[in-house]
Image (cartoon, rainbow, N blue to C red):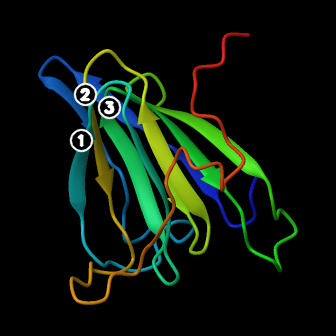
Amino acid sequence: MIQGVKVKKLRVIPDERGRLTELLRCDDSEFFIKFGQVYCTTTYPGVVKGWHLHRVQVDNVVCISGMLKLVLYDPREDSPTRGEINEFFIGVYNPVLVQIPNNVYHGWKCISETEAIVTNCPTEPYNYDNPDQVNVDPHSGQIPYDWARKDR
């Protein structure tokens, strides 16, 4: 596991009316750092969103509908996990929160037949004038990862 990455199995509470899943709580001392904002984004089947990293912000990503292949790459020179790649398959069949530390590249691919809906609760609000984001084309080869499906 890349240094600083945390994964939290989410508790799903179903009953005859539906289900409830808590994503992140302010009293969860292992995961909650601070509140920046909450947003929701979608990704269509087969689409890759990434790569990007944040210099300051820590992300708390949950796929609430559909399925994602979430991939992380550690470029940090001072990290004992420098150069490592982590893959997480998250969504309705694996309800987890993945906490992505700053300075770690991340991206995802929607692997479900329907669009994936993702929530993120980053530690910082988005700064429209000076975004805390470094982007790399997901197919440029700058990060050693192939987004193609792997049939094993």
Judged from the image, the secondary structure of the residue bearing numbered disc 1 is: strand
Establish if 78 lies above or below 19: below
Residue 65 quadrant: top left
Badge 1 crowding class, 10 Å Cα cut-off, few under 14, some 14 to 19, many 20 or more, is some
Q: Choose the circle earlier in sequence order: 3 or 1.
A: 3
Position of 36 relative to 65 (above/below): below
Labels 3 and 1 touching (C-beta < 8 A): no
CB within 8 Å, label 1 to label 2: yes
Q: Are marks 3 and 2 in contact (CB under 8 Å)?
A: no
Q: Which mark is residue 115?
A: 2
Q: Is residue 150 toward the left or the right of residue 47 in the image?
A: right
The quarter of the picture where residue 118 lies is top left
| Residue occupied by mark 3 | 13
- Near mark 3 (Cα within 10 A), the count class, few <14, some 14-19 or many ≥20, is few
Say which residue appears at 67% left-offset and 42% top-offset: 145
Residue lying at the far top in this picture: please name it: 152
Q: What residue do we see at 22% from left, 52% from top?
A: 40
> In the depicted view, which residue is nearer to us: 108 or 6?
108
Q: Nearer the viewer, residue 108 or 28?
A: 108
- Image coordinates of residue 103 in percent, x first then y, are 60, 74
> Which residue ends up furthest to the bottom in the rendered image?
129
Residue 52 position, x and y percent, is 48, 63
